[in-house]
Structures are given as structure tokens and as C-alpha cells.
Image (tube, grey):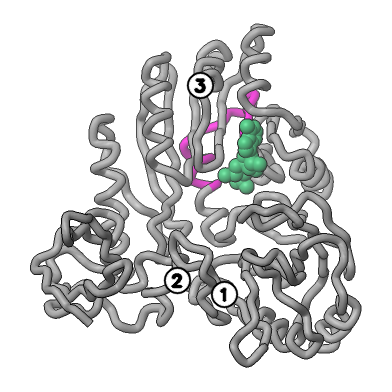
Amino acid sequence: MALKEFKNVSVGYIPDTEIELNNKKYKIHDVIQGEDILVDTDLKYPALHKVIKASPNRIYDGCPYQAECGGCQFQHVSYEYEKKLKEKYLNDLFKSFHLPHISLVTLDMPNNYRNKCQMTYKLSKSKKVVCGLYQEYSHKIVTITDCMLQAKKANEVILALNKVLTKNKIRPYDEKTREGNLRHVYIRYGFNSKEIMVVLVTNGEMFPGRGNVVSDLKKLNLGITTIVQNYNARDTSIVLGDKEKVIYGPGFIYETVGGYKFKISGTSFFQINTLGMEKLYNLALEKAEIKKSDIVIDAYCGVGTISIFASKYAKKVVGVELNKNAITDAKINAKINNINNVTFISDDATNYMTNLAKNRERCDVVLMDPPRDGSTKAFINAINYLGARKVVYISCNAETLKRDLYLFSENDYVVKSITAVDMFPRTIHVETVCLLTKK
Ligand SMILES: C[S@@+](CC[C@H](N)C(=O)[O-])C[C@H]1O[C@@H](n2cnc3c(N)ncnc32)[C@H](O)[C@@H]1O
């Protein structure tokens, strides 16, 4: 082993530092600004060997898999420090907009908050079926059954399921040989409803041993309310395929958030932090100041959660979403909550907004929550024509938010404020809620 010391390392928001060895640059992960470190330079990818002078912000009781697993980035720093880093990152990023201080709303649950988990499977050396999460930038599986971010109940189900899979000699899918059957297991847990959905993702329709797995799982009385088999024969890293078969229960779960009941299917988007979701939506609606006479558009609406939260303040809410299954669920969600002033439309958000603008329609408030890639120039231009008084942009990617805010500024909109919600503690991700008003 060859060790080299690096003193007083420089670290940005993402907790790694760049070092140079033999004219090549490498990233060393899990370090903190100002630390002195020893790097093992013999490895193919040089890595942190030891921290010689530790930062006072370093903690030692974080996740034991941090060094290997790609799931979290902040398990080696105190949560207090993580919050400071997140606030600093956002305030630096949006400096050019001259906004009031961007503050981070935090939740009481920085661990075990994820209502969704996705595990990938392999056989251990002793031929047991084991599962885990991918290493960062790789498809190497780090064996984990007690992830610190996932709901404790989901971890319990995964642990029990692995024993059932081993007993029934289920063959995990091997990406290289494309042999084997079980690719992933996806779990959704209703923190409030206590309902559990288990989705077994297989490499095609055939699933030898399926009946025994399901009957063994049921006998364990873990509280699983539905089991679905999802077929994914594609050669991609996308977890879920397009087809599924319900093998036990209704094929979906219900969850209650903010007094509303929501149907969640395997393939629909649902915020992964249930506690954070309510805070996020209430914050967005506070900023939106919707009036009883307002027509509101909820773009990228998923299963209609924001539309339903907004419905009691507005005259009418129109939710638009690309995923047809999500729209089916959104319509059901409006019905089960007895909400009559929301309409859901299955369309590409840009297409929908530009058509409205062409037809000279008007709206008062736009709520938008696009995926990580952000929105489009045409969508933003269309808002100008629709004349919305306010736009509330919810984003899980501050970089694309910033890009899109420049596009709004080229139109008639002024960025008024951004508030962040720590929906993803212990990771570099953060959700932001931005208010824009028409000049
Ligand atoms: C970040 S999620 C937000 C969902 C919802 N607002 C919520 O809070 O649960 C983004 C949603 O945008 C949808 N989506 C992605 N591309 C889209 C597009 N071009 N047009 C409309 N919806 C899209 C996704 O299917 C997903 O449901």
C-alpha cells in the first residue's frame, strides 16, 4: 500500500476533494474542508485511507456503508453542519438574483425517512440471496439490509424477504450474463396508513418459485398489503418495466397526507419523504396566496397531490402530467377525497401550456414541479401569455431551477424568494420552492 498525505484539503458543497497524481486528477470522497488526509495511491481509484486531522464537524456514528455505498454523501458530517452546507450552497448558487436569505426548513426525522426503497439482488459467496444498493458511479452491489435512510419497516421486510428468496432458491438476475430472474425489489411504505407494497421486478414474465415466495411472505405477517410482479426485460438500469401483474392484494397502497388520502401504484411518482411532502406543499401554497376566484395550473402533477392540496383555496385547479397511469390515479384521488374543482389532463406539460397560450386562455397561478431536468423555454414563454399573477416553482435540482429562472427573468417575471425544504437529509439533494411574480 502506498500512502500520500494531503493537508488542509479544499472541499466544495459535494464532500470530495480533487487530488493530482502522475498528472491525473482524482476525486477523494467523504472529506471535509480543512482536513489533513492520507490517500491510498496504490488503488486503481485512489481513496481516503485515514483522516489525520479531522474537522470538528466530522461524526463517527453515521452509516457504516458510507465509504462504499453511493446512496448518501453526508453520513460523515453532523446534521447541523450538513444544514449549514446546504444553506450556503443555495445562497451562493442564487447570489445573482439578489434574493432574501434562502433558509432551509428541516424535518425532525433525518434518518429512516424514505417511504420508497429499491434494492438490487445478487448471490453471496455462500449462495444466499442478498441485496443492496449500488456503489457510486458503478453497478457493483454493496450488500445492505439496514439502510439508515429507508423506513425501518421496509428494512424489516427486506431482511425477511431475503430469507424467503434464499429458501425458495430464487435466482438473482446477473447484468453481465443476463441470466437469473429477480432484478430488484421495490417497496413503498405508508408511514401513516401502515400499508406496504412489495414489487418484485423480474427479467420477464416467468418467475419460477413465485407462488412459494408469496405464500411464505404472507405467513410471516409483516403487514404487506399488496405484492406486484413487474416485468423488466430491458438491458437498462431503469428499475421498473412497463408491464405488471398483481399477485396479492389490490396492486396499490393508500397513504394519508395532510388529511387527504392518496392511491399510490408501483409506477407513479410519489414524494419519498412523507413528512417533508406536507411541509413542502404547505410552503408552496403559502407562497402562492391563491384566491377563491383563481384558476390554477398544477404542471407536472404526478398523482395530483399538489392539485388536491390547492383545491380548497382555488376556484379551479387543472393538473397536467405525462404519465397516463399517474393521471388515472390522480382522478381516483380527487374522487376519494370528494374534490370536484380539479381536472386532470394527460399531456406533455410544454405541449399543454403552449396550446393554452395559442388559444389565448388565461390562468392566475401556476404551480410547477418538474423532474430533475427542469422545465422548457417554450413552457416558460407560454406562462407569460397566460398572464399568471404568480408562479411557484418546486424543484429537486437547484441547478436546473437556476437555468429556468433566467428564462423567467427574460419574460415578465421577477424571482421573489426561494425557501428550501430538507426532503433528503444525509444526501446532497435538497428541494426548493421558488416564488415568481409578474412585473
Ligand atoms: C418531481 S415529480 C412531481 C410530481 C408531483 N408534483 C408530486 O409532488 O408528487 C415530476 C413529475 O413530472 C412528470 N413529468 C415528467 N416529464 C413531464 C412532461 N414533459 N410533461 C408533464 N409531466 C412530466 C413525471 O411523470 C412526474 O410525475
- The quarter holding residue 17 reads bottom left
Q: Nearer the viewer, residue 433 or 372?
A: 372
- Mark carried by residue 132: 1
- The quarter holding residue 198 reads bottom right
- Left or right: 184 with respect to 110? right
Residue corresponding to mark 3 = 380
Q: Is mark 3 within 8 Å of ligand 1?
A: no
Q: Amino acid at mark 1?
A: Gly
Instruction: Provide the secondary structure element on which disc 1 rests.
Output: strand
The CA span between labels 3 and 1 is 40 Å
Extreme left residue here? Answer: 7
The N terminus: image quadrant = bottom left
Question: Residue 126 appears at what percent x and percent y?
Answer: 62, 92
- Left or right: 163 with respect to 328? left
Q: Say which label, 3 or 2, has the lower sequence index.
A: 2
User: Does the CB distance between marks 2 and 1 fall below 8 Å?
Assistant: yes
Question: Residue 300 appears at what percent x and percent y?
Answer: 62, 36
Q: Amino acid at mark 2?
A: Cys
Residue corresponding to mark 2 = 69
